[in-house]
Amino acid sequence: MAISVFEKVKEIQAAMNIKNDLQVEVFVNVNLGNIYESLGLYMQSLRYYMDSRGYADKMDSTNPDSAISYANLGKYKLTKAVVSII
């Protein structure tokens, strides 16, 4: 059920022609990655975490949401650096 909710968010976003909402993309992809990780589907989880990181890299470096994707990839040094700026 949780996966279908986040997939629906992506569909609605596409239908509304909402582009470049990086925070939404980071949020949705991180949560999909978390769900797949909890199911033991690590390759799918990694794909969503990497997608999330791609969006986070386009955000302002001081945006705290950018730290979320790095934390899920285990890049705690980068997460700590981003959080310490704010």
Image (spheres, rainbow, N blue to C red):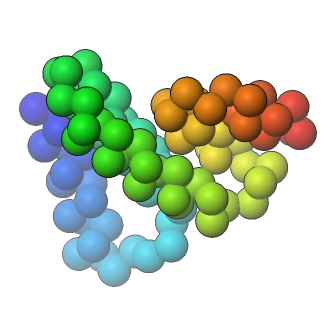
Placement of the C terminus among the 4 image quadrants: top right
Which is nearer the eye, 2 or 49? Answer: 49
Residue 68 seen anywhere in this rendered image of the structure = no
Which is nearer the eye, 34 or 12? Answer: 34
Which is nearer the eye, 77 or 22? Answer: 77
Figure check: 15 above or below 65: below
Which residue is at 43% across, 49% downward? 50
Which residue is at 70% across, 33% downward? 79
Residue 30 seen anywhere in this rendered image of the structure = yes
Residue 36, quarter of picture: top left
List the single residue furthest toward the front: 43
Determine whether, in the image, residue 39 is placed left or right of residue 35: left
Instruction: Estimate the x, y position of residue 27 in percent, counting from the top left.
Output: 45, 44
Which residue is at 59% across, 38% downward? 70
Instruction: Estimate the x, y position of residue 51 in percent, counting from the top left.
Output: 41, 55
Determine whether, in the image, residue 8 is placed left or right of residue 10: left
Figure check: 13 above or below 25: below
Instruction: Estimate the x, y position of residue 55 in percent, counting from the top left.
Output: 52, 60
Placement of the N terminus among the 4 image quadrants: top left
List the single residue furthest toward the right: 85
Figure check: 20 above or below 32: below
Figure check: 25 above or below 39: below
Instruction: Estimate the x, y position of residue 9 in percent, counting from the top left.
Output: 26, 54
Which is nearer the eye, 65 or 43? Answer: 43
